[in-house]
Image (spheres, helix red, strand yellow):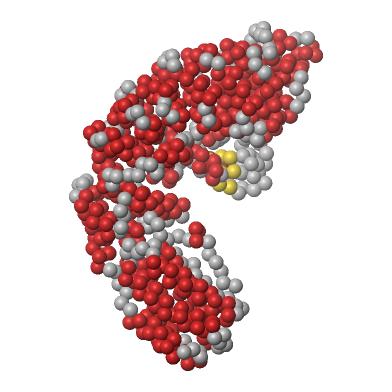
């Protein structure tokens, strides 16, 4: 059989072509050659922004051979072994030609193919030489086709032998201009934009969307570099990425905002109450950067568990079980969650020997040129936000949202350039919902940075953000405003300030009541952030939050929303007043049901946390109700074995209380079960 390759798995300029297997029939080989030739000839109509001459002459030669293959098939000629061998060599070369043409016309790869023009020309040269060699040894006299067809084959062979495959002078000139522009940026000099415009014209990168495709492609290639642990080209890719970001923001003034109207909505983040305890190593209690799972199913930071094992210990530090194998399995899912958490809060997770590459490369620029490109672009966007027309301001905000989305260094540059205050002004003055969505989305991305939070509050941004939360022109804008509240509430000093603003909590409660699942999540998580200040507890309780959370438990099937709602309930239950309010609901029957049935470990752990607080603050009457639930104890023991250190400790505490209650019940000493006794009415 002739193997088909998954094109999505193939990297640029990599050609995994294979020879047809020996058992293949000549007829099948010939049909496959014809299909390959036809596919290659179809590239005649494709746009080649570079390598035009090399591509055209290769396609032309294979087009001549296609006529030969088709006549051979139509005449049903018997093929000798020597002919089949030559056809096999041509088939091998044609596969590579098709891959090369595919790369040369790939969407978004125009700049990269220009940069690789020497490599690509060399590939064309090698493939044309391979075709010429196969045709030289092809016993054409043994194939009974027409004279005209044989002449075409001879012509194709002659062209292949004599072909001059080299870099096009225009490509070479454009390449030198790119290097000149990058050199200027690296020296801290902003080059004349006309130089880059000439390159863009040569590559036929005509508009904002074309430029954005180039950016997405370069980001993809950069990710491949890091995932393959082969970072040799990463600095240069970073420089090119920064250059195209600069071009998109500075050179392409016109953007098709209508086609991007839904983009801001699609980028809305559904926040979650991350339990940071899940990210800490049970040994070092520090944030894990390289989490690995041992044979008992427990996860530790690699450096910590390796030291444990090197000391001669073969028991699991957390469970005390003997490990059946010293093998450490990388926990990639948890690693990605930790990296995303670190990116969101703007910190770097470091281990004893190294830093997480994914985090480090967003904190620092990929190259000196990339750093300068970002600084120049940030200052340009800041000026546009102040002095531009409303369309230019909106476009600048859109660029900021793109740039700050997943790069900490970009966020810091944009903040230092002074973009936050004009974004706040745009937010306040905008009367068009699309512009408001873009402005609030840009602020959301910048609010993840420590300096961004400070700038937003000190620039008077809290009031306009709250106005959007209350009276936003779209539900999407309100949801993003709630997300900003969450990030601002991560700063201790701002929790009190935000909570004391009378409209905040009631408005968040309304979002939980009427919002989409994403809106509900953001509203819940924002309230969770505010509850980290004890002074906000009563405001949250009096705003009717608890009944809404109970409604979510009965009406929603979204595990994350339920877990987040339980996290808020757990924070409320820490106080006696919170416990009293929760006990007026059906919590003592609803939450054990979630503990038994939920597939989410976070939901089960927060359920136990709530129940433990209700027992400690609610007195023996609450414990007595739970003690009657005979299935509760098995759920708690299960959490002891498969829960996090946080969840296990809470389960252990509740088990002890229930055991004490049963012992006291049998001896008549119920009053001594809980730390403090307070009579409450249990619903």
The x and y percentages for residue 657 are 69, 19
Q: Tell me where residue 500 sits by quadrant.
A: top left
Q: Identify the residue shown where x is 44% and y is 86%.
A: 149
Q: Residue furthest top?
A: 679
Q: Identify the residue shown where x is 36% and y is 49%.
A: 209
Which of the two residues, 306 or 663, is positioned nearer the viewer here?
663
Q: Tell me where residue 422 sits by quadrant.
A: top left
Horizontal side of residue 205 vs 345, given as left or right: left
Above/below status of 35 relative to 446? below
Q: Which residue lies furthest to the bottom in this view?
A: 141
The x and y percentages for residue 311 are 57, 42
Which of the two residues, 172 or 491, is positioned nearer the viewer here?
172
Q: Identify the residue shown where x is 39% and y is 69%.
A: 44
Which of the two residues, 145 or 87, is positioned nearer the viewer here?
145
- Residue 108 appears anywhere in the view: yes
**Location of the N terminus (image quadrant):** bottom right
Q: Tell me where residue 611 sits by quadrant.
A: top right
Above/below status of 537 relative to 431? above
Q: Identify the residue shown where x is 53% and y is 35%.
A: 279
Above/below status of 640 relative to 464? below
Which of the two residues, 284 or 626, is positioned nearer the viewer here?
626
- Residue 487 appears anywhere in the view: no
Horizontal side of residue 213 vs 673, given as left or right: left
The x and y percentages for residue 384 are 25, 36
């Amino acid at each position: 059989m002739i193997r088909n390759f998954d094109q999505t798995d193939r990297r640029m300029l990599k050609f995994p072509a294979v020879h047809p297997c020996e058992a293949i029939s000549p007829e099948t080989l010939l049909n496959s050659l014809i299909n390959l030739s036809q596919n290659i000839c179809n590239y005649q109509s494709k746009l080649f922004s570079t390598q035009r001459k090399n591509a055209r002459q290769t396609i032309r030669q294979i087009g001549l051979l296609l006529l030969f293959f088709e006549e051979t098939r139509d005449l049903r000629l018997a093929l000798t072994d020597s002919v089949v061998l030559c056809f096999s060599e041509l088939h091998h070369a044609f596969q590579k030609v098709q891959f090369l043409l595919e790369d040369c016309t790939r969407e978004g790869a125009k700049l990269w193919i220009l940069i690789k023009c020497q490599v690509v020309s060399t590939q064309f040269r090698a493939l044309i030489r391979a075709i010429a060699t196969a045709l030289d040894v092809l016993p054409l006299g043994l194939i009974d086709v027409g004279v005209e067809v044989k002449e075409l084959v001879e012509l194709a062979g002659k062209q292949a032998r004599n072909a001059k495959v080299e870099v096009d002078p225009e490509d070479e000139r454009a390449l030198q201009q790119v290097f000149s522009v990058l050199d200027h940026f690296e020296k801290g000099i902003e080059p004349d934009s006309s130089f880059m415009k000439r390159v863009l014209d040569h590559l036929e990168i005509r508009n904002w969307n074309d430029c954005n495709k180039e950016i997405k492609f370069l980001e993809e290639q950069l990710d491949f570099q890091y995932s393959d642990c082969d970072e040799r080209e990463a600095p240069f890719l970073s420089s090119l990425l920064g250059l195209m970001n600069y071009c998109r923001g500075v050179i392409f003034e016109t953007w098709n905002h209508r086609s991007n109207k839904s983009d801001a909505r699609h980028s809305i983040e559904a926040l979650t109450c991350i339990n940071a305890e899940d990210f800490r190593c049970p040994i070092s209690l520090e944030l894990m950067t390289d989490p690995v799972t041992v044979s008992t199913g427990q996860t530790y930071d690699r450096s910590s568990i390796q030291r444990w094992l090197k000391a001669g210990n073969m028991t699991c530090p957390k469970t005390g079980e003997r490990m059946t194998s010293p093998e450490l399995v990388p926990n990639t899912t948890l690693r990605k969650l930790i990296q995303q958490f670190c990116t969101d809060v703007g910190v770097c997770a470091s281990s004893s020997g190294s830093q997480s590459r994914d985090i480090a490369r967003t904190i620092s620029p990929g190259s000196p040129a990339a750093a300068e490109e970002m600084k120049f672009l940030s200052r340009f966007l800041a000026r546009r936000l102040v002095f531009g027309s409303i369309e230019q301001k909106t476009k600048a905000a859109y660029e900021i949202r793109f740039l700050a989305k997943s790069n900490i260094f970009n966020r810091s540059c944009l903040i230092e350039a002074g973009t936050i205050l004009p974004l706040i002004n745009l937010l306040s003055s905008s009367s068009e919902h699309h512009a408001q969505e873009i402005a609030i989305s840009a602020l959301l991305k910048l609010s993840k940075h420590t300096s961004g939070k400070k700038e937003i509050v000190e620039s008077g941004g809290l009031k306009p953000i709250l106005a959007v939360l209350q009276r936003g022109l779209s539900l999407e804008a309100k949801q993003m405003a709630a997300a900003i509240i969450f990030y601002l509430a991560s700063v201790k000093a701002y929790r009190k300030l935000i909570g004391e603003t009378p409209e905040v909590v009631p408005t968040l409660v309304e979002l939980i009541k009427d919002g989409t699942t994403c809106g509900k999540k953001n509203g819940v998580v924002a309230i969770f952030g505010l509850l980290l200040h004890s002074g906000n507890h009563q405001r949250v309780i009096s705003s009717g939050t608890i009944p809404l959370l109970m409604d979510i438990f009965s009406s929603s099937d979204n595990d994350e929303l339920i877990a987040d709602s339980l996290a808020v309930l757990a924070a409320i239950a820490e106080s006696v007043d919170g416990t009293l309010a929760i006990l007026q609901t059906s919590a003592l029957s609803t939450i054990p049901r979630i503990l038994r049935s939920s597939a989410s470990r976070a939901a089960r752990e927060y359920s136990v946390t709530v129940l433990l607080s209700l027992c400690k603050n609610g007195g023996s009457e609450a414990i007595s109700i739970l003690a009657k639930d005979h299935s509760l104890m098995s759920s708690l023991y299960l959490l002891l074995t498969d829960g996090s250190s946080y969840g296990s400790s809470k389960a252990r505490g509740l088990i002890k209380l229930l055991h004490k209650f049963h012992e006291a019940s049998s001896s008549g000493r119920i009053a001594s079960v809980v730390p403090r006794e307070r009579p409450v009415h249990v619903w």
